[in-house]
Image (cartoon, rainbow, N blue to C red):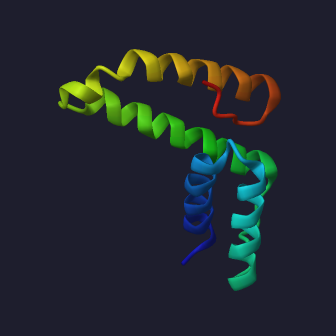
């Protein structure tokens, strides 16, 4: 698997762990125990983690499921807060 794909998979996993940095570090250590981490700059990883939020928001905009459509306003608001934080700090956080 090439490094770009590995990095994307790691970013997706980290997105879901972002509220617990200890678990995030364990994920990276476990990954590295099997194969070297892909070469990356910290800001690249943060951008890919933020991108996961945008992919999920895009999914909600495209869905036809009424329950998921109802989630759009709240998720859009969370996304705006999260991206504002990301642009101000360079770090993505799962702000509620």
In the depicted structure, whether residue 69 falls above or below residue 92? above
Which residue is at a point 28% across and 29% down the rendered structure image?
Answer: 68
In the depicted structure, whether residue 53 falls above or below residue 10? above
Measured as percent of width and height from the top left, residue 13 is found at 58, 56
Side of 76 relative to 96 (left or right): left
Measured as percent of width and height from the top left, residue 17 is found at 63, 50
Side of 64 relative to 82 (left or right): left
Which residue is at a point 79% across and 22% down the rendered structure image?
Answer: 88
Measured as percent of width and height from the top left, residue 86 is found at 72, 29
In the depicted structure, whether residue 49 falls above or below residue 60? below
Tell which of 86 and 93 is nearer to you: 93
Side of 24 relative to 8 (left or right): right
Q: In the current view of this chain or complex, which residue is farthest to the bottom?
A: 34
The quarter of the rendered structure image containing the C terminus is top right
Image quadrant in which you'd find residue 37? bottom right
In the depicted structure, whether residue 49 falls above or below residue 12? above
Which residue is at a point 66% across and 42% down the rendered structure image?
Answer: 47
Measured as percent of width and height from the top left, residue 50 is found at 61, 38
Image quadrant in which you'd find residue 71? top left
């Amino acid at each position: 698997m090439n490094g770009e794909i590995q990095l994307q998979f790691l970013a997706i996993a980290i997105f879901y762990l972002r509220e617990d940095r200890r678990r995030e570090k364990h994920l990276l250590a476990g990954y590295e125990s099997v194969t070297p981490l892909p070469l990356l700059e910290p800001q690249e990883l943060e951008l890919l983690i933020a991108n996961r939020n945008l992919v999920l928001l895009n999914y909600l905009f495209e869905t036809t499921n009424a329950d998921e459509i109802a989630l759009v306003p709240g998720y859009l608001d969370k996304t705006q807060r999260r991206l504002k934080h990301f642009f101000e700090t360079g770090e993505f956080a799962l702000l509620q």
